[in-house]
């Protein structure tokens, strides 16, 4: 859910490039800005019924507004020189100071901190509001991890509480992320504790573990995750039942709005559990015939009675064409199955050390924002609109 910001400055030439940058960057999904360069128009807006998440402006605008007595929202004064009336701390009787002329990403991060976007999402959410989102592919090298990580970052930036779960046999997310400091025991220990709590012949009960002790926080991803599993054998021995237990624990904790599950091979037990348990499935395809053919065959298999508990896969599946040469590359996968989103091919990703670029490409970010708006938002309408808060 984007933060609603009121910006009030004297110079219209300050407003235009800032709004242009927001619109064409990842901040477009985080901020909704109402900008004013005339005091009268600003005061009229602030006297209306709409209550913004924060007010940022020149001293003359802020002072005029504060005289009216309506200062129940966070606010900050924009300082030309980093100092306001001899107060170097920047604390202004309940407000803050933000340097007016600085790099735009730094300026916008300061505004986001002022808003405290996550304040309304920190409270526990009911279990039924946790969306389990499986990212799957019938063929390799489709870009599942790139898509899943970008989605986690964008949804986390909207103020949602997001968990990124990597179920690849070899966790490739480390190519994109730097591990934070700390020694959380991780997925291996959680699996052990879940089995121990179930007892012999029993079943693990969801929502009983204190997940905080097992997870790490990726600030660059704005999401939580498990530390990558060191012992490959433990990951390979993770059964369908083990995976279902972990998914139930994450969804039943009342801690997350969205759990994004990045899977390995579609025939693996972990992925089969994701197909069975997820509330929404994103199939990631590439434009080659092999990817299309394999996806169609797996969908056909899941529709058969002998597929176990996978008959409802088709209904909760959405289809994303990745690495597309142009935005019109979508089309029919098979009879009645259409692409729901198209993500662009980014040529710079062919460069060495491209990991950081994969999470900061404006073109791809724009595609991910459209994907979230078109596919994820309908699945979490109360969270996005705020009606469920």
Image (cartoon, grey):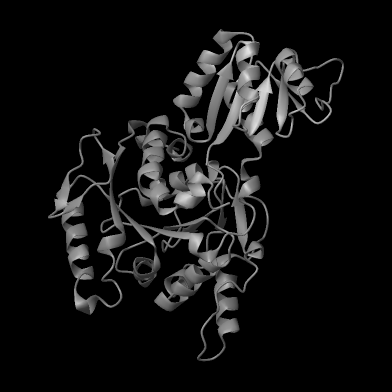
Residue 261 shown left or right of residue 37 in the figure: left
x and y percent of residue 8 in the render?
Answer: 63, 17
Single out the residue that lies furthest toward the right. Answer: 86
For image coordinates 37% across by 59% down, the residue present is 280
For image coordinates 44% across by 46% down, the residue present is 151
60 or 293, which is in the foreground?
60
Is residue 102 something that shows in the picture? no
For image coordinates 61% across by 10% down, the residue present is 38
For image coordinates 61% across by 25% down, the residue present is 6
Where, by quadrant of the figure, is residue 39 drawn? top right
Residue 289 shown left or right of residue 271 in the figure: left
x and y percent of residue 23 in the render?
Answer: 46, 25
286 or 382, which is in the foreground?
382
x and y percent of residue 354 in the render?
Answer: 43, 37
Compared to 113, does 238 lie above or below? Answer: below
Compared to 368, does 202 lie above or below? Answer: below
47 or 282, which is in the foreground?
47
Where, by quadrant of the figure, is residue 215 drawn? bottom right
76 or 269, which is in the foreground?
76
Single out the residue that lies furthest toward the left. Answer: 335
Is residue 188 something that shows in the picture? yes
All told, the count of numbered labels is 0
x and y percent of residue 162 in the render?
Answer: 53, 53
């Amino acid at each position: 859910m984007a933060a609603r910001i009121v910006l009030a400055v004297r110079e219209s030439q300050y407003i235009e490039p800032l709004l242009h940058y927001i619109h064409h960057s990842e901040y477009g999904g985080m901020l909704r800005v109402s900008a004013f360069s005339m005091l009268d128009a600003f005061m009229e807006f602030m006297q209306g019924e709409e209550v913004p998440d924060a007010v940022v402006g020149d001293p003359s605008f802020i002072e005029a507004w504060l005289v009216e007595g309506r200062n129940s929202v966070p606010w900050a004064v924009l300082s030309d020189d980093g100092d306001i009336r001899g107060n170097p701390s920047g604390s202004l009787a309940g407000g803050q100071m933000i340097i007016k002329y600085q790099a735009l990403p730094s300026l916008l991060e300061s505004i986001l901190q002022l808003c405290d976007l996550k304040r309304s999402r920190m409270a526990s959410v009911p279990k039924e509001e946790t969306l389990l989102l499986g990212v799957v592919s019938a063929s390799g090298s489709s870009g599942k991890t790139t898509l899943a990580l970008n989605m986690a970052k964008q949804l986390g930036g909207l103020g949602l509480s997001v968990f990124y779960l990597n179920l690849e046999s070899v966790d490739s997310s480390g190519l994109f992320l730097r591990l934070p400091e700390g020694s959380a025991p991780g997925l291996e220990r959680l699996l052990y504790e879940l089995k121990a709590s179930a007892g012999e012949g029993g079943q693990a009960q969801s929502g009983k573990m204190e997940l905080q002790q097992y997870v790490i926080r990726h600030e660059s991803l704005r999401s939580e995750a498990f530390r990558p599993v060191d012992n490959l054998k433990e990951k390979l021995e993770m059964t369908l039942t083990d995976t279902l237990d972990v998914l139930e624990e994450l969804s039943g904790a009342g801690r997350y709005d969205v759990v994004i599950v990045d899977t390995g091979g579609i025939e693996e037990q972990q992925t089969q559990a994701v197909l069975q348990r997820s509330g929404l499935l994103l199939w990631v395809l590439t434009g080659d015939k092999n990817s299309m053919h394999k996806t169609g065959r797996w969908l056909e298999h899941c529709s058969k009675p002998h597929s176990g508990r996978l008959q409802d896969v088709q209904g909760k599946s959405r289809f994303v064409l990745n690495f597309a040469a142009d935005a019109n590359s979508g089309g029919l996968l098979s009879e009645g199955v259409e692409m729901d989103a198209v993500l662009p091919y980014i040529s710079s990703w062919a460069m060495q050390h491209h990991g950081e670029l994969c999470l900061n490409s404006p073109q791809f970010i724009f595609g991910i924002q459209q994907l979230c708006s078109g596919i994820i938002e309908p699945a979490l309408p109360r969270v996005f609109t705020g009606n469920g808060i």
